[in-house]
Image: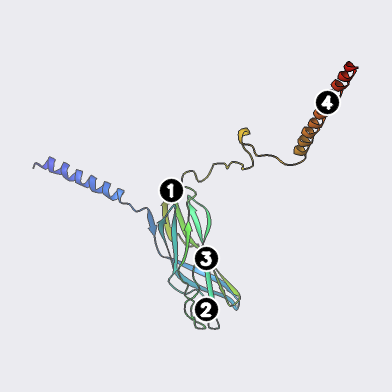
């Protein structure tokens, strides 16, 4: 093969490889982000840094998100028995969407000893896209309820997004108007009730009485005329 032809062939292979790389580009990007939490606890303020991981898996018309803590972010001065601690958190939405979503999880499945970092179980929630495009998911406020108390941990270091998804909103999910169930076509109108109906009903009844009265008067008139004719 001549040099020009070989060069052209290699260029074609490189172009195809580049196209394949572009076609295989992932629709999701995830990374572990260090989050500096400042926690308001019943025994005072505390701080802790924990790497946060958020993963998203397609589920029906949305995505199931799982938020994971790799380190504990608070502690308790007393033992927390099994089932005594209930965590929840928010995730901030960015990019093509905005606002927050909630993730929740099970209570602690084992006793948490006093004065040891509290390990948060994985929290999950479902995100349904409202707009199409790249949406980012960033760790928000963590809430821990235990033994009748509430601890709130807020990120203070403006952490970056732990997950980016390229999403597509479901068509027809917004912009439409719902028909009023109380409005119907004239051919299928439901009977009405109320004073107007009563008036119509009474009017009909009155018309019947009037007709009966007129018939009775006519019958009496004809009877009197026949009697006079016989005389």
Question: Which residue, given by chain and number where applicable, does mark 3 sit on?
Answer: 89
In screen coordinates, is 142 left or right of 216?
left
Q: Nearer the viewer, mark 1 or mark 4?
A: 4
Task: State if disc 4 and disc 3 touch (CB < 8 Å).
Answer: no
| Residue density around tag 4, few if under 14, some if 14–19, many if 20 or more, within 10 Å | few
Q: Quadrant of residue 54?
A: bottom left
Q: Is residue 149 above or below residue 158?
A: below
- In space, the residues marked 1 and 4 are separated at their CA atoms by 76 Å
The front one of 59 and 168 is 59
Question: Which residue, given by chain and number where applicable, does mark 2 sit on?
Answer: 75
Q: Which of marks 1 and 2 is in front?
A: 1
Q: In which quarter of the image is the N terminus?
A: top left
Mark positioned earlier in the residue sequence (2 or 4): 2
Mark positioned earlier in the residue sequence (3 or 2): 2
Task: State if disc 2 and disc 3 touch (CB < 8 Å).
Answer: no
Q: Which numbered circle lies on residue 214? A: 4
- In space, the residues marked 1 and 2 are separated at their CA atoms by 41 Å
The front one of 176 and 152 is 176
| Residue 132 % position (x, y) | 45, 47
In screen coordinates, is 202 left or right of 129?
right
> For the residue labelled by badge 2, is the local secondary structure a helix, a strand or a loop?
loop
Residue name at image x 38 percent, y 55 percent? 28
> For the residue labelled by badge 1, is the local secondary structure a helix, a strand or a loop?
loop
| Residue 171 % position (x, y) | 46, 44
Q: Which of marks 3 and 2 is in front?
A: 3
- In space, the residues marked 3 and 1 are separated at their CA atoms by 25 Å
Question: Which residue, given by chain and number where applicable, does mark 1 sit on?
Answer: 168
| Residue density around tag 2, few if under 14, some if 14–19, many if 20 or more, within 10 Å | some
Mark positioned earlier in the residue sequence (3 or 4): 3
């Amino acid at each position: 093969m001549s040099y020009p032809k070989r060069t052209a062939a290699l260029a074609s292979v490189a172009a195809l490889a580049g196209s394949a790389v572009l076609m295989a580009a992932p629709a999701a990007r995830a990374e572990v982000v260090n989050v500096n939490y400042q926690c308001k606890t019943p025994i005072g303020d505390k701080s802790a840094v924990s790497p946060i991981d958020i993963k998203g898996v397609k589920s029906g018309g949305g995505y199931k998100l799982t938020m994971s803590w790799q380190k504990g972010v608070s502690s308790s001065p007393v033992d927390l028995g099994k089932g005594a601690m209930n965590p929840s958190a928010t995730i901030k939405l960015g990019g093509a969407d905005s606002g927050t979503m909630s993730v929740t999880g099970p209570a602690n499945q084992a006793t948490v000893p006093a004065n040891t970092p509290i390990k948060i179980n994985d929290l999950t929630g479902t995100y349904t896209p409202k707009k199409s495009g790249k949406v980012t998911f960033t760790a928000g406020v963590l809430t821990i309820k235990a033994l009748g108390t509430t601890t709130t941990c807020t990120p203070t270091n403006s952490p970056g997004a732990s997950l980016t998804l390229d999403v597509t909103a479901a068509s027809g999910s917004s912009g439409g108007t719902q028909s009023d169930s109380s409005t119907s076509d004239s051919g299928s109108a439901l009977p009405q009730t109320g004073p107007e109906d009563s008036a119509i009903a009474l009017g009909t009844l009155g018309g019947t009485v009037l007709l009966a009265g007129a018939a009775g008067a006519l019958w009496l008139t004809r009877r009197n005329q026949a009697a006079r004719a016989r005389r």
